Image (cartoon, helix red, strand yellow):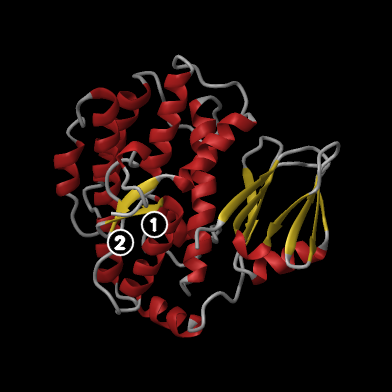
Amino acid sequence: MLKRTIEISTSGTRLSVAHRQLVIERPDLPKATVPIEDIGVVIVDDARASYTQAVFLELLNAGATVMVTGRDHLPAGMMLPLDAHHVQTERHRAQIAATEPTRKRIWQTLINAKIAQQGVVLAHFTGQDGGLGPMARRVRSGDPDNLEAQAAQRYWPLLFGKDFRRDRDAGGANALLNYGYAVVRAAIARSIVASGLIPSLGVFHKNRANPFCLADDLLEAYRPYVDWRVRLLLDERGGKAPATLEREEKAALLSLFNETVMITARRNPMLVAIQLSAASLARVLTGDGKALALPAGLPIAPDLLAPDGLG
């Protein structure tokens, strides 16, 4: 079942749980309820929000992720369930024992997919892939040539203009990218834990202060979708980025989870694709599989879908 992403941004919201329902009470608005088992991610963007302890317990027991934002409205932290898979300990041991060649092949696959997708995004907006298609095919095990960085040097100026610089602390388009990456990262982290893996043990990312290194690894293959949505938002506004993140922009970025993408030769919502990718990553890391399942191509327009939305 496709899990829902719930964003709370009305000032003074109170969250509680009753009869396995998340109860959302907002000033001057009707009370709303959502079944706990339908929720995948809850994002609370309200400094005045209040919770009961049961909110965290019920959401985590159901396998959901809870994310809170800071004053800049960007995600500042998240809570994940600790017990999310029936053979979790067995998979942890296998993940730790994964060989260096296995980890390098995984990173090669992720960077190949990322650069290829960047080329697809560029081709959509500019008519050319900037040479990223051929570059993706040259990625070797572990990406020793750092083609990821070389691709980025071509990619960002072609996508957002020659004066654009990717800066995690900047506003404008960078703030939109930061928010999009953060919410997709949260969904990936949730799926990684649900697949029985250790989120802090990455195949490439190894920052000892980062509890989500493995999520950041898998995120690389999904970043171009965020880039695509941000460029669409900017084009709709005549190329001008909003001064601050507003509800409309956040809703547009969150709607990425409902976009239909191709993965394993089937059409699936992106949130399901993330779950399939995490499950395949678990199989490769534990020696039960050889290939990662990663999405390819841009999201499929609704008018191109079959009546039932399936391939």
The label nearer to you, 1 versus 2, is 1
> Relative to residue 224, is residue 69 drawn left or right?
right
Query: Could you say which disc has been placed on residue 139 in the image?
Result: none
Residue at image mark 1:
273
Q: Position of residue 252 (x, y in %)?
A: 52, 35
Which residue is at 46% across, 43% downward?
256
> Relative to residue 289, is residue 134 drawn left or right?
left
Q: Residues within 10 Å of mark 2 (few under 14, many from 20)?
A: some
Q: Position of residue 179 (x, y in %)?
A: 55, 39
Q: Is residue 94 above or below residue 12?
A: below
Q: Secondary structure at mark 2?
A: loop
Q: Reading the chain from its start, which is encountered first: label 1 or label 2?
A: 1
Proximity of marks 1 and 2: CB atoms separated by less than 8 Å? yes
Quadrant hosting residue 78: bottom right
Amino acid carrying mark 1 in the image: Ala
Quadrant hosting residue 202: bottom left
Which residue is at 76% across, 62% downward?
55
Residue at image mark 2:
293
Q: CA distance from mark 1 to mark 2?
A: 8 Å
